[in-house]
Amino acid sequence: MMPKLDGFELAKSLRDHGVETPIVFLTARSELDDRVRGLDMGGDAYVIKPFDIPELLAVIRAVVRRSGQQTSSIATFAGGRCQFDFVGRTLQIDEESVLLTARELDLLEALLHAQGRYCSREELLERVWGADYEGGSRVVDVYVRYLRRKLGDDVIQSGRGLGYRIP
């Protein structure tokens, strides 16, 4: 039900091109034929809307576990003080859970995926807020400040004319 290309054909095309990335169908199409078709076309799991977040996270953990890619689900940074779980989208600092808003989680995830590389405001704006966002780029600075309050001022570095990074 996506524009131009449906999920079934996308999954088949990815598999035909040798892409082994796990595929989880998240859809309102609940008919038995649709579920079977999705799995036969290369899907690893099929979750029907409406769903509960804990169920979706459990399905993702199971698919990642089966694919053998679980080793990269936790990023440790800030000298080992901070741990971010990409699958569960949780943050711990000194073994204490820290609550982040969805936008803060998205920003932290984008910075961690950059693996120490500086990310410009524009890059972060597009990755976190999306290409359709019409506000100014300074919103990135505001959310970096929110994260610094929670992570510590020294965790996110800024480079003049370069952007932000987590070393």
Image (spheres, rainbow, N blue to C red):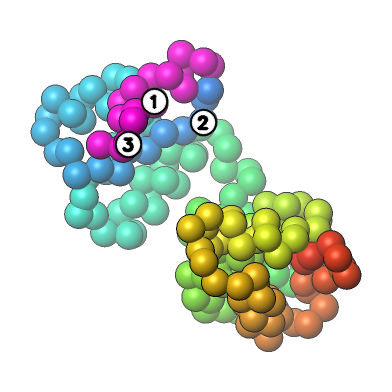
Question: In which quarter of the view is residue 144 placed?
Answer: bottom right
> Is 60 placed above or below 52 here?
above
Question: In which quarter of the view is residue 106 placed?
Answer: bottom right
Residue 82 location (% of width, % of height): 70, 69
**Are the two marked residues, 3 and 2, in contact with CB atoms closer than 8 angstroms?**
no
- Name the secondary structure under disc 2: loop
Circle 1 or circle 3, nearest the eye: 3
**Are the two marked residues, 1 and 3, in contact with CB atoms closer than 8 angstroms?**
no
- Name the secondary structure under disc 3: loop
The crowd level at tag 3 (other Cα within 10 Å; few <14, some 14-19, many 20+) is few
- Per the model, the C-alpha gap separating discs 1 and 2 is 10 Å
- Name the secondary structure under disc 1: helix
Q: Tag 2 or tag 3, which sits nearer the N-term?
A: 3
- Residue shown at the point (17%, 38%) measured from the top left: 29
Q: Tag 3 or tag 1, which sits nearer the N-term?
A: 3
Residue matched to label 2: 21
Q: Is residue 146 visible?
A: yes
Residue matched to label 1: 11
Q: Which residue range is magenta in the image? A: 1-18
> Is 118 placed above or below 142 here?
above
In the picture provided, is 98 more to the left or to the right than 6?
Answer: right
- Residue shown at the point (49%, 75%) measured from the top left: 101
The crowd level at tag 2 (other Cα within 10 Å; few <14, some 14-19, many 20+) is few
Q: Is residue 111 magenta?
A: no
Residue matched to label 3: 3
* Foreground residue among 94 and 37: 37
Circle 1 or circle 2, nearest the eye: 1
User: Where, quadrant-wise, is the C terminus in this rendering?
Assistant: bottom right
Amino acid carrying label 2: it is Thr
